């Protein structure tokens, strides 16, 4: 629920568009955005809020990623 909401907010230009992307009613997404704003201390639809939220989301995804835990390719696997 939380990740889908943040992705919808990042990829939309309005609350209604974010609601459509998340598959919820616009009043539901508005409540979620108010919760996000209260927790983060900024509105994701105001000024630099969307880039800040997008950057925070990217950092969160990179920290959770396991792609860098994979062994590096060897010369034998490149052939």
Image: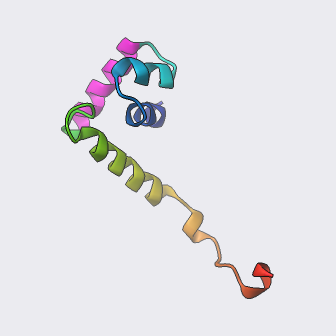
Residue 44 in percent (x, y) is at: 27, 34
Task: Tell me residue 60's x, y (percent).
Answer: 41, 52
**Residue 27 position within the rendered picture, expressed as x and y whole percent measured from the top left:** 35, 12
What's drawn in magenta, residue-wise? 26-39
State whether residue 54 is above or below residue 42.
below
Relative placement, left or right, of 43 versus 77 is: left
Q: Quadrant of residue 5?
A: top left
**Taking 51 as reference, is 14 above or below it?**
above
Is 25 contained in the magenta span? Answer: no
Depicted 26 relative to depicted 76: above or below = above
Q: Is residue 36 left or right of residue 66?
A: left
Quarter residue 35 falls in: top left
Principal secondary structure, stretch drawn in magenta: helix
Q: Residue at x 38, y 32 (%)?
A: 9
Tell me what residue is drawn at x 34 percent, y 49 percent: 56
Between 14 and 29, the one lying in front of the other is 14
- Does the stretch in magenta take in 34? yes
- Give the tally of numbered discs: 0
* Coloring applied to the structure: rainbow
Q: Quadrant of the C terminus?
A: bottom right
Q: Residue at x 52, y 20 (%)?
A: 23
Q: Is residue 77 left or right of residue 70?
A: right
Please state if 68 lies on the left or on the right of 27 as rendered: right
Q: Position of residue 1 (x, y in %)?
A: 48, 30
Task: Single out the residue that lies furthest toward the front.
Answer: 13
Q: Which residue sits at x=18%, y=38%? A: 41
Q: Quadrant of residue 16?
A: top left
């Amino acid at each position: 629920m939380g990740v889908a909401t943040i992705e919808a907010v990042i990829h939309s230009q309005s609350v209604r568009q974010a609601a459509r992307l998340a598959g919820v009613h616009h009043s539901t997404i508005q409540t979620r955005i108010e919760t996000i704003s209260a927790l983060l201390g900024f509105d994701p639809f105001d000024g630099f809020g969307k880039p800040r939220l997008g950057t925070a989301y990217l950092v969160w995804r990179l920290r959770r990623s396991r792609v860098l835990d994979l062994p590096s390719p060897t010369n034998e696997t490149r052939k």
